[in-house]
Structures are given as structure tokens and as C-alpha cells.
Image: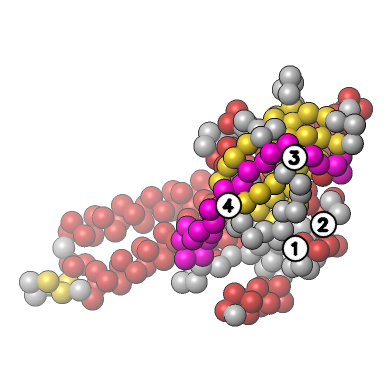
């Protein structure tokens, strides 16, 4: 009930689906704006943040339903997260007469209750990568061993077995996969900044109020050093994250042009 209230409020003030364009029910904010928003959400006491719906979903048939909150999406990127690059992708795909076939694989996924899973795979016998949108009802897709990871996150095991998908479920290629990786790295960093800021504020308040041997902890030099070091590290990480977001915004037009050219060339090859 609390989450439903928060979602309604976030939608009302425009802090929902930050990457989707407004035509699809999102807000279409820059990477820099998203960093500031995710940082503030991370600073709150409740484990809540805007829905993570990649901008490329706006070109899919699911766009309006995702923007309206009727569908949810989860990134099945465990193989990528282990290395931080495309080299970690072990799932393979190949073209068939009716679409594509994904190889047998088993990975862990967050938000197993999601309606859609974005799944990257490498083409058999080639250096090309594909990004697929898999409906949880897709034949050959199964979920098992679901459980709570933290108070606000669940995890489960996703298994693909001779999974057949249609051509329209291929959303992009290596450019889109790399963009998703970069966006998620910045999002996680921004949220971590907010959590760290809250921890620093709580630690400082505790040091001021906690009295030991007749003196507040904040009056002890060793405690002051630790708080100062944490404050400096937080400031440095903040500027690094903001710089990364700003660079992403500057490179976005070039990325879109390159991705479009790559997508057209790949369609011609298929």
C-alpha cells in the first residue's frame, strides 16, 4: 500500500520512467538530471526509486503499457554485471525461419515478478550481440527459487530452454546493450551517493550526541578524521558521477546516430 501511494505521487510530479519520452508516459530527462533525482531518492529512508525503463523501450510495442505502469520490466544482465562488459555474455542466439532461438542458459534476475525481461545474447559464429525483450510467458522461459534479497528487492533463477522468440522481440544490438550497462552504472552510483550522504549525516549526528567518558564523540580527533575522510570521499565520488553523466549527455547524439546506422546495417544483413 505504501509503495502504491509513492508510485502515484512520483507519477504526479513527473519523477517516474525518467528515460522514456513523454509520448510514452515518461519524463525523458537527461543523464545529469537522473543522477540528481536518484541521489535524492537514495537519501530517503524508504527503499523506493523511480521505475527503471530504458529509453529504447519507447520503440517497442510495450512502450505505452510500461509508461502507464500496466507492465514492468527487469534487466536480465547478470552475465554482464560479472565483468562489466559484453565479454561476460555467454547466452547465444541464432536466426530461425520465424525469428530467433536463444541457447539454454541459467542466470539470476532481480524483480522476478516483472512482466518483461531484457536479455542480451551473442550471435552464434559472429561478434554481433542482440538485446531481446522476453515476455515471462515465453515458451521455454521459466523462473524458480524466488526469494527476498533485501527488504526491497527479490531475486530468482531464470532458465531458458530452447527459447523461440519473434523478430519484433529483438530491440537492439551491442550499442544498445552497452548504453544500458553505462546507464545502470551511473544509476547505481547516484543511488549509492544518496545512501552515503544519509549515512554521513546520521553518523555526524550520532557523534555529536553520543557522550563517552564525559565527552561527545565528535570532540575526539580520531572520530573527526573518519568523518572528514568520508566527507571528502563522498564529494569526490559526487563530482566523478556528475562528470560521467555529463559526458553521457554530450555523447548521446553521436551514440544515437551510430546505433541507428548499426541497426540498419544489421537488418540488411538479416
Q: Percent position (x, y) of residue 240?
A: 51, 46
Q: Which mark is residue 191?
A: none
* Residue at left offset 46%, top offset 72%: 45
Measure how far apart labels 1 and 4 are at the Cα level: 21 Å
Per the picture, the main secondary structure of the magenta-coloured stretch is strand
- What is the span of residues highlighted in magenta in the rendered image? 144-168
Q: In screen coordinates, is 125 left or right of 244?
A: right
Mark positioned earlier in the residue sequence (3 or 1): 1
Q: Secondary structure at mark 2?
A: loop
Q: Residues within 10 Å of mark 1 (few under 14, many from 20)?
A: some
**Mark 3 lies on residue:** 163
Tag 1 residue:
71
Q: Is residue 145 magenta?
A: yes
Residue 98 vertical position relative to residue 207 in the rendered view, above or below: above
Quadrant containing the C terminus is top right
Q: Label 3 vs label 1: CA separation? A: 21 Å
User: Which corner quadrant of the image does residue 72 belong to?
Assistant: bottom right
| Residue displayed at 78% across by 34% down | 101
Observer-nearest of 15 and 237: 15
Q: Is residue 257 visible?
A: no
Q: Is residue 98 visible in this depiction of the protein? A: yes
The answer to whether the residue labelled 1 contacts the one labelled 4, judged by CB atoms less than 8 Å apart, is: no
Furthest residue toward top: 125
Label 4 residue SS: strand
Which mark is in front, 1 or 4?
4
The Cα–Cα distance between marks 2 and 1, rounded to whole angstroms, is: 8 Å
| Mark 2, residue position | 62
Relative to 203, is 141 on the left or the right? right
Q: Quadrant of residue 22?
A: bottom right
Q: Earlier in the sequence, mark 2 or mark 1?
A: 2
Amino acid at each position: 500500500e505504501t509503495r502504491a501511494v509513492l508510485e502515484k505521487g512520483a507519477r504526479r510530479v513527473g519523477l517516474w520512467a525518467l528515460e522514456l519520452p513523454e509520448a510514452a508516459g515518461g519524463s525523458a530527462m537527461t543523464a545529469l538530471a537522473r543522477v540528481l533525482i536518484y541521489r535524492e531518492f537514495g537519501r530517503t529512508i524508504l527503499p523506493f526509486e523511480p521505475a527503471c525503463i530504458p529509453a529504447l523501450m519507447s520503440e517497442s510495442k510495450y512502450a505505452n503499457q510500461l509508461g502507464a505502469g500496466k507492465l514492468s520490466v527487469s534487466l536480465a544482465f547478470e552475465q554482464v554485471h560479472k565483468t562489466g562488459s559484453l565479454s561476460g555474455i555467454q547466452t547465444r542466439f541464432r536466426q530461425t525461419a520465424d525469428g530467433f532461438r536463444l541457447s539454454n542458459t541459467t542466470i539470476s534476475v532481480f524483480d522476478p515478478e516483472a512482466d518483461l525481461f531484457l536479455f542480451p545474447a551473442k550471435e552464434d559464429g559472429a561478434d554481433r550481440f542482440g538485446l531481446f525483450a522476453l515476455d515471462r510467458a515465453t515458451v521455454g522461459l521459466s523462473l524458480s527459487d524466488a526469494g527476498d534479497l533485501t527488504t526491497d528487492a527479490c531475486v530468482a533463477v531464470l532458465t531458458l530452454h530452447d527459447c523461440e522468440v519473434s523478430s519484433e522481440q529483438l530491440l537492439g544490438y551491442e550499442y544498445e546493450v552497452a548504453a544500458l550497462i553505462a546507464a545502470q552504472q551511473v544509476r547505481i552510483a547516484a543511488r549509492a551517493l544518496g545512501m552515503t550522504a544519509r549515512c554521513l549525516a546520521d553518523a555526524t549526528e550520532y557523534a555529536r550526541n553520543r557522550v563517552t567518558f564525559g565527552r561527545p564523540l565528535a570532540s575526539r580527533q580520531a572520530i573527526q578524521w573518519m568523518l572528514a575522510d568520508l566527507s571528502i570521499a563522498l564529494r569526490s565520488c559526487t563530482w566523478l558521477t556528475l562528470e560521467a553523466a555529463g559526458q553521457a549527455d554530450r555523447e548521446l547524439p553521436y551514440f544515437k546516430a551510430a546505433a541507428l546506422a548499426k541497426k540498419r546495417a544489421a537488418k540488411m544483413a538479416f
